[in-house]
């Protein structure tokens, strides 16, 4: 008997709104990315537990324009991934452009994917269903066509999609408004067909603590659907604010070749109180069909930290190295930019083994434009994040590490200078007053000696200071420290202890994203000196 179990979440960190499809013995999964570029990471697995990122579906500016993005919840909402007759389809919404709802296609899930095919449909959370007769149906969510009675009064609607022209045809029709009376935010619809029934799976009540999963069905896709009397089929809202897994919802389901049924969905792990720095993560939960309806995790009905592994051959998944030495010419798939990057501000080839960042006049705290910044997701409640930086800053220039919830809520730990004297600063941004958005909460002058001057020749003038910058977050307390020796040993010197990590949560900042950790360089109006990053190190401490 196999007693093996897997741990949830299967994708830790900011991986919300998962969608899944099976092609033979292979499984593919995508998630939302909002205002980050590239968009919609795509993962592959053969066991549903261990996942390898094989690309980013939206990896070109013409696929994902984010120029009109002005908050961390804009951009790409809730993708759906489907496969039909040799073609993969990914359908989603770009809130930050006039593209709206669109489809991209590929014959290889690793890409390349097509340019967007705009549909001109209303609302958000589009999905596709391929019926037995070859017809394709679009599902979406929008305000009631007869008029919404309140904010979030939604309908789930369907319209046929002609696959030859890739255009919606005929009239759309509503099929359901959700399970609960006066419910808000019926959304995330997916239709499946089983045993002659069309099943509609949605989420309700918003993607916060009241989030829940409900289901309806019909014998005819053109007729209204009838809700399950046992709705919701899944929620954690009754478990209280202190339960370790909250906000469960936005699911998609898949049947394995062995006949098992599994649901992927988002959920959050609060800590240090009801605060969710990690954002919405991807979980996996088993279910069975009982009396023609899904029964989630029989006997318990909740999402748990561990479950018995699926009856599938085990595979390997991504194992990201703790230290990244930038010994490559193209960034790995898990790195992201904020909005569309200015590509000339980045180089991995100018000095191999270093990431060169050219400071941008667009600040991390600006609500538009492209800051010079690359980042990865926070994946643990407690972690250390460190960079090795070589830099010769002038006044009004800075480079270092950033802990980013949004442009209005972040920490920057940077090397800068005042009147030619190098300084380390911790800068906190925790509000929306654009006149006074960045606050220096710690500052420490450092001496330039032979032990902290780079020995590497870079394409820049002057001597570059070599410094290790580290942020260490334990639950909701963040410590910032540094060291200046060039060896792998040496004590770190504190610059600030016990900074408040709660500002890096959607509970404080709003929006839909989790915290990301990165390196950046920015300037005011000066030409700007290049910053060279020798390495970054992320280590989970949970």
Image: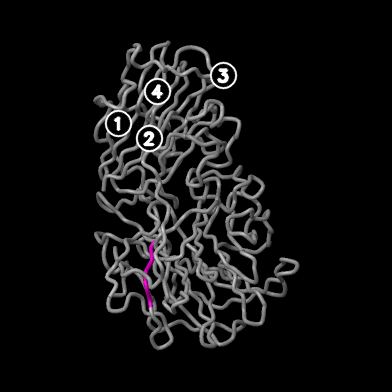
User: Is residue 446 within the magenta segment?
Assistant: no
Q: Provide residue 492's location: percent of width, then percent of height.
A: 26, 26
Query: Disc 4 to disc 1, how far (Cα)?
Result: 12 Å
Which residue lies at the image location 27% right of the left edge and 29% below the top edge?
496
Nearer-the-camera pick, 435 or 365: 365
| Residue 421 in which image quadrant | top left
Q: Which label sits on residue 415?
A: 4
Q: Nearer the viewer, mark 2 or mark 4?
A: 4
Q: Secondary structure at mark 2?
A: strand
Depicted 491 relative to depicted 148: above or below: above
* Residue bearing the label numbered 3: 527
- The stretch in magenta equals 283-287
Decide: few, some or many residues near mark 3? Use Cα within 10 Å; few <14, some 14-19, many ≥20.
Answer: few
Q: Position of residue 327 (x, y in %)?
A: 48, 34
Residue 187 image offset from top left, x and y in percent = 50, 67
Q: Give the distance between the C-alpha atoms of the residues marked 2 and 3, in whole angstroms.
A: 24 Å
Q: Is disc 4 surrounded by few (<14), some (14 to 19) or many (20+) residues within 10 Å?
A: many
Q: Residue furthest right?
A: 165
List the residue tagged with mark 1.
Answer: 480
| Residue contact between numbered discs 4 and 3, judged by CB atoms under 8 Å | no
Q: At which x and y percent is residue 31? A: 49, 57
* C-alpha gap between disc 1 and disc 3: 28 Å
Question: Which is nearer the eye, 52 or 141?
Answer: 52
State the residue position of label 2. 411
Look at the numbered disc 3 and give the secondary structure of its residue. Answer: loop
Asked if disc 2 and disc 1 are in contact, CB closer than 8 Å, the reply is yes
State the SS at label 1: strand
């Amino acid at each position: 008997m196999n007693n093996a179990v897997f741990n949830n979440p299967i994708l830790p960190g900011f991986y919300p709104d998962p969608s899944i499809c099976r092609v033979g013995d292979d499984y593919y999964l995508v998630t939302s990315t909002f205002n980050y570029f590239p968009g919609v990471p795509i993962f592959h697995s053969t066991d549903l537990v261990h996942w390898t990122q094989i690309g980013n579906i939206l990896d070109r500016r013409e696929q994902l324009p984010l120029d009109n993005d002005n908050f961390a919840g804009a951009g790409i909402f809730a993708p759906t991934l489907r496969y039909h007759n040799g073609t993969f389809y990914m359908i989603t919404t770009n809130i930050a452009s006039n593209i709206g709802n669109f489809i991209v296609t590929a014959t290889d899930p690793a890409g390349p994917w097509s340019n967007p095919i705009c549909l001109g449909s209303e609302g958000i959370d589009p999905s596709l269903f391929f019926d037995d007769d070859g017809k394709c149906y679009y599902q979406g969510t929008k305000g009631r066509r007869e008029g919404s009675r309140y904010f979030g009064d939604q309908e789930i609607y369907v319209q046929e999609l002609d696959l030859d022209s890739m255009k919606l045809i005929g009239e759309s029709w509503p099929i359901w408004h959700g399970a609960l009376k006066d419910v808000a935010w019926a959304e995330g619809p997916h239709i499946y067909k089983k045993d002659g029934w069309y099943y509609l799976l949605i989420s309700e009540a918003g993607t916060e603590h009241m989030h829940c999963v409900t289901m309806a069905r019909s014998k005819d896709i053109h007729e209204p659907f009838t809700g399950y009397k046992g709705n919701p089929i899944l929620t954690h809202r009754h478990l209280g604010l202190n339960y370790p897994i909250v906000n469960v919802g936005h699911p998609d389901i898949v049947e394995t070749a062995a006949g098992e049924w599994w649901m992927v969905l988002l959920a959050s792990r609060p800590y240090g109180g009801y605060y969710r720095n990690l954002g919405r993560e991807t979980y996996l939960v088993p279910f069975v069909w009982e009396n023609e309806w899904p029964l989630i995790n029989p006997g318990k009905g909740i999402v748990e930290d561990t479950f018995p592994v699926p009856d599938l051959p085990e595979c390997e998944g991504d194992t990201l190295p703790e230290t990244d030495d930038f010994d490559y010419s193209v960034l790995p798939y898990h790195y992201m930019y904020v909005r569309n990057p200015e590509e000339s501000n980045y180089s991995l080839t100018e000095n191999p083994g270093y990431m060169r960042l050219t400071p941008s006049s667009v600040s991390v705290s600006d609500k538009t434009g492209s800051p010079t910044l690359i980042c990865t997701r926070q994946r643990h409640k407690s972690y250390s994040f460190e960079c090795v930086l070589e830099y010769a800053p002038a006044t009004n220039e800075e480079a270092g590490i950033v802990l980013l919830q949004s442009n209005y809520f972040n920490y920057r730990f940077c090397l800068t200078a005042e009147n030619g004297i190098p300084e380390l600063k911790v800068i906190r941004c925790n509000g929306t007053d654009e006149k006074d958005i960045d606050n220096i909460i710690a500052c420490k002058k450092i001496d330039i000696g032979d032990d902290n001057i780079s020995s590497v020749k870079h394409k820049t003038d002057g001597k570059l200071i070599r410094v290790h910058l580290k942020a260490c977050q334990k639950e909701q307390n963040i410590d910032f420290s540094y060291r200046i020796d060039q060896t792998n040993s040496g004590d770190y010197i504190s610059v600030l202890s016990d900074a408040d990590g709660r500002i890096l949560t959607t509970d404080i900042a709003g929006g839909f994203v989790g915290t990301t950790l990165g390196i950046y360089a920015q300037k005011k109006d000066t030409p700007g000196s290049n910053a060279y990053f020798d390495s970054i190190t992320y280590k989970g401490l949970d």
